C-alpha cells in the first residue's frame, strides 16, 4: 500500500494513464492532481484555471489527459511535459462534462451545456477530431433529445471496439441503458430496467457487453443481451459507491463504508477486501495491467492510496 499525498481533497474522479505511470484525481475544487506513481514524486497540481473537474479521461493512444470542468472550460494536459491547453474559450456560463476518447485517440466527445438563464439553453453532444499536434476541430454535434423531452440527460462512455456511445437515459422512475452511433445519436440498442429502478452509479465492462450498476444500494451486473442480472442485495447500513471494473473484466470493485471489496464479476462473491482506514472511499480505478488499484476517500486530507493487488 502506498499513499499519494497531494493538494486535491475530496476526490470524486480517478484515472490511470494508459502506460500505468500516472494517476489523476479531481473533484469539486480547483484543478486536478497528477501523480507519477512510478517515480514516487509528490502530486502536481495542474489545470488550476478550471473548477469542478469531476469528469476526466486519458487518451488510450497518446496518454493526454482530458478534463471537463463545470466552470472553467475544457482542458487537456500532457503528463510527460506538463503542457496545458485550453480547448474552449473560458466561459463560466457554459459547462462541460463526460469526456470520452476513441481508442485511436482521433475523436473526443463531450457533453456541453449552459446553466444560466442569461444565455440560450444548450444541451448537446459534441464531437471533435484530434490532429497529430493535439489540436481539436469540432466536426459534429447533436442535441440531447432526452434533455429536451424529459428534463434529464444522457450520460455516456465510449463503447469498446465500436463507434458507439453507451450510456444511461433517465427520468423520474424510468431508466434504460442505450447505445447509439457516436456521430449522429442514432439508437442501436437498449436495455430497459424495471419500473421504479433508480440508478445511482454505473460502469461498462471492458468487453463492452456487460454493465454494472447500483440501485437502492443493491449491485447488479447484466449482459446487454437482456439476460437476467446478477444481484448482490443491499444490506443493513450498506452504502455502496466507487464501482470499477478490472481491465480483464473478471473482477469488479465496489466501495462500502470504509472498505473496498473486490468481487468476482461472474458470481459477485467477495474475493478480497481492502481497508481504507482514514475515510469513506469515493472512487476506485484499476491500473491498466490490473495489478494495482487507486482509491480516494472523503476523509482526512483526501489523499489517494494505491494498493498492490498481487
Image (tube, rainbow, N blue to C red):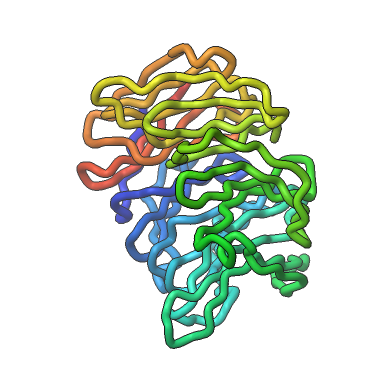
| On screen, residue 5 above or below 118 | above
Residue at point 38% right, 52% down? 43
Residue 210 sits in quarter = top right
**Going by the image, does 31 lie left or right of 148?**
left
| On screen, residue 105 above or below 140 | above
Q: How many marks?
A: 0
- In the current view of this chain or complex, which residue is farthest to the front? 195
- Is residue 36 visible to the viewer in this orientation of the structure? no
Q: Whole-percent x and y of residue 154?
A: 58, 55
Residue closer to the observer: 101 or 156: 156
Q: Whole-percent x and y of residue 296?
A: 35, 40
Q: Whole-percent x and y of residue 18?
A: 62, 43
Residue at point 39% right, 35% down? 241
Residue closer to the observer: 222 or 268: 222
Residue closer to the observer: 51 or 168: 168
Residue 178 sits in quarter = top right
Residue at point 60% right, 33% down? 211
- In the current view of this chain or complex, which residue is farthest to the bottom? 118
**Going by the image, does 90 lie left or right of 165?**
left
- Image quadrant where one finds the N terminus: top left
Residue at point 30% right, 40% down? 297
- Is residue 43 visible to the viewer in this orientation of the structure? yes
| On screen, residue 27 above or below 257 | below
Q: Whole-percent x and y of residue 294?
A: 43, 36
Amino acid at each position: 500500500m502506498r499513499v499519494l499525498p497531494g493538494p486535491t481533497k475530496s476526490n470524486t474522479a480517478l484515472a490511470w494513464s494508459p502506460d500505468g505511470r500516472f494517476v489523476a484525481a479531481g473533484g469539486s475544487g480547483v484543478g486536478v492532481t497528477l501523480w507519477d506513481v512510478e517515480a514516487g514524486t509528490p502530486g502536481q497540481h495542474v489545470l488550476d484555471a478550471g473548477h469542478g473537474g469531476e469528469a476526466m479521461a486519458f487518451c488510450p493512444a497518446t496518454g493526454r489527459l482530458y478534463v471537463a470542468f463545470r466552470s472553467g472550460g475544457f482542458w487537456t494536459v500532457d503528463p510527460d511535459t506538463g503542457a496545458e491547453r485550453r480547448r474552449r474559450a473560458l466561459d463560466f456560463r457554459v459547462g462541460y462534462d463526460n469526456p470520452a476518447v476513441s481508442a485511436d485517440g482521433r475523436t473526443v466527445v463531450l457533453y456541453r451545456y449552459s446553466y444560466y438563464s442569461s444565455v440560450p439553453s444548450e444541451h448537446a453532444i459534441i464531437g471533435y477530431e484530434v490532429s497529430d499536434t493535439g489540436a481539436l476541430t469540432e466536426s459534429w454535434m447533436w442535441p440531447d433529445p432526452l434533455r429536451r423531452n424529459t428534463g434529464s440527460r444522457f450520460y455516456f462512455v465510449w463503447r469498446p471496439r465500436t463507434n458507439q456511445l453507451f450510456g444511461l437515459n433517465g427520468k423520474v422512475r424510468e431508466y434504460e441503458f442505450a447505445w447509439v452511433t457516436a456521430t449522429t445519436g442514432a439508437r442501436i440498442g437498449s436495455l430497459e430496467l424495471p419500473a421504479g429502478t433508480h440508478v445511482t452509479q454505473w460502469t461498462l465492462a471492458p468487453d463492452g457487453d456487460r454493465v454494472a450498476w447500483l440501485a437502492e444500494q443493491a449491485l447488479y451486473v447484466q449482459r446487454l443481451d437482456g439476460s437476467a442480472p446478477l444481484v448482490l442485495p443491499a444490506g443493513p447500513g450498506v452504502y455502496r459507491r466507487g464501482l470499477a471494473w478490472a481491465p480483464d473484466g473478471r473482477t469488479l470493485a465496489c466501495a462500502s463504508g470504509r472498505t473496498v471489496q473486490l468481487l468476482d464479476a461472474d458470481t459477485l462473491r467477495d474475493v478480497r477486501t481492502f481497508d481504507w482506514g482514514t475515510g469513506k472511499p469515493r472512487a476506485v480505478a484499476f491500473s491498466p495491467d490490473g495489478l494495482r488499484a487507486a482509491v480516494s476517500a472523503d476523509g482526512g486530507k483526501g489523499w489517494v492510496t494505491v494498493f498492490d493487488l498481487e
